[in-house]
Every structure is written in C-alpha cells, then in structure tokens.
Amino acid sequence: MSQLPLRAQLASALGRTAATLSRATGRGDGSVIGGRLGLMLEPDLLRKLAADRKLALVSATNGKTTTTRLITSALQELGDVATNAFGANMPAGHVSALSSAKAAPYAVLEVDEKYLPEVLDTTNAGIVCLMNLSRDQMDRAAEIWLLAQKWRRALDGKPAHVIANCDDPLVTWGASTAARVTWVAAGQRWREDSWCCPECGGPLDRGGSMAAGQGAAAGTDSSWACRECTFHRPEPNWVLDGNDVIDPRGHRWPLDLQLPGQANRSNAAIALATAEAFGLEPARALPRLRTVTSVAGRYTTVERDGRSLRLLLAKNPAGWLEAFDVADPALPIILSVNAQGPDGRDTSWLWDVDYRILGGRPVYVAGERRLDLALRLDVARVPFQLCDSFDQAVSVLAPGRIDVIANYTAFQQIRAEFGRAV
Ligand SMILES: [Zn+2]
C-alpha cells in the first residue's frame, strides 16, 4: 500500500489512541469514538484508508455481521483482512477498522443499509454484497423501498461488482442498476415485505407455497415475477439447495457449517460467491467458513448452575423467524425483549411475528418490555410463564439445555452478565 498523507496518518493515529483510551476507561470497544475523532481531524480519512485495498461492503437488514465474518474468514486464505468485527457499521467504525489494519491488502466492511450509498461513494469498493431488505422494527414497506431506490442510484454508473440475493425481489431491484451482478439464490424466509413489484407496484407472483414465510426451505421453488411488468427473478449463478451450494459450474458443495440454521447457510452461499469474486475458489474458501462457530456472541452457549443457555439474537420480525428456525423445539425457551434506543422504542412490531410455532414448548418471558410480549403471546394463544427478570427465568428452569431469544439490548445485557464470549 502507498503511504497515507501526513494529515491522514496523524488523524488515523490519534483515532487509534482515542480508541485505546476509550477501551481502557471501560467505554466500550472504542472503535466508534476513535473513528469519529479521526474523521473530525481529516474528513477524507475513510477514502484515503480505503484506497489501494481490495474492498467488499456487506449490507442487509439481517445477517450482515455474520456474513462479514464469513467472508473475512475466507479471504484470510489470501492474506490479511481489515474488518469491523464488532458491528460498528457506520463510517466512524469503518475508519477505525481500516486504521487498525493499515497494511492489510483486503478489507470487508459491514455497512448499515442506510449508509451504503455514502460509503460506496467514499470508498469506491470493488465488491458489494446485498442480501435482504425487510422492515427493521418500525420501518415500513415504503421506507425500505426508498432504501432500495437509493442503492440503485448509488450503484448506477459505478464499476462495483455486486453479489446479490435474487430470491429477495427488493434486493434484486436495488442491485439491478449495477454494471455487473452475480446472482445468488440464497433463499428468503421473511416474505411479508415483498408482495408488491418494486418496479411498478403490481402484484408479485411467488413460486412455492403461499405460506412460505414460515416453512419453506431454500431450494423449493423460489421463482417470482411481476404480473404486470417484465420484472422477474434473474437466473441465479449460485444456488443454495438445502445444505448444499451449487456453484456456477454446477459443482455441489456440502456446507456443513458449525453455525446453525438456514439463515446462516444463506449467508455462507453469499460468502462463497463473494470469495470467488476475489479469486478464491470454494475448495479453499469453504473450509474456512466451517471454522466459524459464533459471531459477536450469537449462538454462543453460556453456562450457569448446570444450565446451558444458547443465545440467539432477534432484533426484527425477519430475525425472529431465523431464531425460530435455529431453536430446538424440544427445549424450553426464554424470550427477552427491551425497547431501548437501538431496539426501537415502540414494540408494536412484535405483532408482525407469528409466535404460534412456540406452542407446545415451555416458554418463559423476561426483559423490560415483557408485558408487551406477554400480551402478544396471549393473543396468539401460546402458553408462557412471566418472569420478573432474566435471572429469575433461568433459576426456575431445571438444569439442562435452554434456548434464549433476545432483541438487541436485551441480548447485550445477557452477554454482559455472562461475560463477552465471542
Ligand atoms: Zn412490475
């Protein structure tokens, strides 16, 4: 890599010092404050730090942290990789990630969906991965359509190679102005936000079962087409079929990941296609994907008094469906919901989720907004036990394995109490 100009070097070094101080004083992992300071001193810092690297941006409503981690693991086969491992996915976090690995020839950055146009403009990333778009807490269909439209404008006229999930109509529409797209049939579990054609507003005909939002596995008929215009699902280059990924040459690769669930197989399919865009074939990328066991504490199992608690994050309706897919129907389950800033203060989005799948297993409800969730479960006729706290829920359960589904700050509280296993 070429040397950074002096001002950028200083800004980057000061940002790192601030990050170290922030960590030392217990104010988080420091990546955001360090990056923010760096950007104040040198507004052009992100562009300078990104120059001369092979860079991939990863964006979606769900799965971007995990997919970023999977792609990073794969690319480590080629050399050093800079990445924002702790999900600080706005420009200050990107500055911090790139500053802390200056010599790395590769970089993989998770990017907040709303910041993708700005970060793409600034970094001129060569590769962009787009996986899914659905409502996040109080976002509604019109807002995510506007987001997809911003992606279209940002990609139009840029040389970036886009890796996109063609099973998601809105992502397909958002990606289709790009100069070059590799389409991955990576599945779509949450379909409630894509019954309308993003191009003309007409009805979308979907293949497979009409109730597919809950039960359909990837690999069933995922085709879709607008009834009123020509917009339809592009022919995929890569296909996720159950546990296998079929590459563009027709070779079938059994994934055999350690990460659980269909959503992670979908993330892995995107990661394999992205690795190949970097020149890394599946035979070399896949063994690296299989080494990933937990991402930022998700899927981690923590122990207390003979109880093994597996932590699943569900921060929006699509995330709940993914967590239900991973949760073991034979085990008791604790649900914990908060409504602090990062969770969205309004919990009405809980009504978008169909909880009936939990019927028949022991359900325990905790978290600051446990009454909101309790009402929702009551209306769905799912029996549950209301607990004053997460600790109480754990203590009333018998020793053994327990699944935990929590939204963002509830999840962080549990991790803080049980230690930050990563
Ligand atoms: Zn249409």
Image (tube, rainbow, N blue to C red):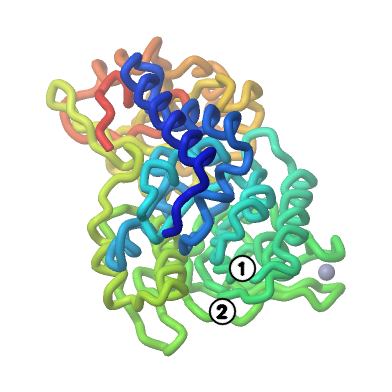
Q: Quadrant of residue 17?
A: top left
Q: Are marks 2 and 1 in contact (CB under 8 Å)?
A: no
Q: Please say if 379 is above or below 211.
A: above
Circle 1 SS class: loop
Residue 200, horizontal then vertical, whole percent: 86, 65
Q: Which mark is residue 101?
A: none
Between marks 2 and 1, how big is the CA–CA gap? 19 Å
Q: Is residue 206 visible?
A: no
Residue at the spot 45% in from the left edge and 58% down from the top edge: 2
Amino acid type, residue under disc 1 in the picture: Ala
Residue at the spot 42% in from the left edge and 59% down from the top edge: 1
Q: In the orientation shown, which residue stands out farthest toward the top? A: 388
Residue behind mark 2? 236
**Image quarter for ligand 1:** bottom right
Of 309 and 16, the residue lying toward us: 16
Q: Nearer the viewer, mark 2 or mark 1?
A: 1
Residue at the spot 24% in from the left edge and 16% down from the top edge: 395
Residue behind mark 1? 160
Amino acid type, residue under disc 2 in the picture: Pro
Q: Is residue 242 left or right of residue 382?
A: left
Residue 336, horizontal then vertical, whole percent: 43, 25
